[in-house]
Amino acid sequence: MPETIHTLHPDKKQGVKISQEKYDIIRKAILATLRKQREMTFMSLSRAVEKEVDGNFDGSVTWYVTTVKLDLEARGLIKRVPGSRPQLVKLV
């Protein structure tokens, strides 16, 4: 049985249980992308991660980016830029 992780949510809402392997792939791509850019919009991040995984991912990349991004926010690794529209995210 594949390993899973129960994600966290920055607003203390219920997280979701996802594949540890998929979580690790998206987490690595998000962090690598944000290390290259000072800050970026969520949509730019999502597109960059999609290019990073380059079709070698089974599932909706955008859904996983959203889920893992929220988890990384809850863990204090990334944060939203307050008052930004569209939403900007950056490494802590």
Image (spheres, helix red, strand yellow):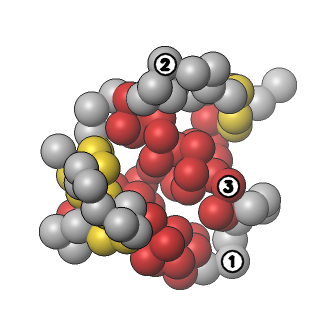
Q: Nearer the viewer, mark 1 or mark 2?
A: 2
Q: Is residue 40 left or right of residue 6?
A: left
Q: Whole-percent x and y of residue 40?
A: 31, 70
Please indicate, yes or no, whether residue 49 appears anywhere in the rendered image: no
**Amino acid type of disc 2?**
Lys
Judging by the rendered image, the residue that carries numbered circle 3 is 63
Of pointers 1 and 2, the one earlier in the residue sequence:
2
- The answer to the question of whether label 1 and label 2 lie on touching residues, with beta carbons closer than 8 A, is no
**Separation of residues labelled 1 and 2 (CA atoms):** 32 Å
**Amino acid type of disc 1?**
Gly
The one nearer the camera, 69 or 81, is 81
Q: Is residue 64 left or right of residue 72?
A: right
Q: Is residue 37 left or right of residue 16?
A: left
Q: Residue at x 64, y 63 (%)?
A: 62
Q: Classify mark 2: residues with Cα within 10 Å, few (<14), some (14-19) or many (20+).
A: few
**Amino acid type of disc 3?**
Trp
Q: Is residue 21 above or below residue 17?
A: below
Judging by the rendered image, the residue that carries numbered circle 1 is 55
Judging by the rendered image, the residue that carries numbered circle 2 is 12
Is label 3 in a helix, a strand or a loop?
Answer: helix
> How many numbered markers are drawn?
3
Q: Could you say which quadrant of the image residue 86 lies in?
A: bottom left
Q: Residue at x 29, y 62 (%)?
A: 84
**Separation of residues labelled 2 and 3 (CA atoms):** 19 Å
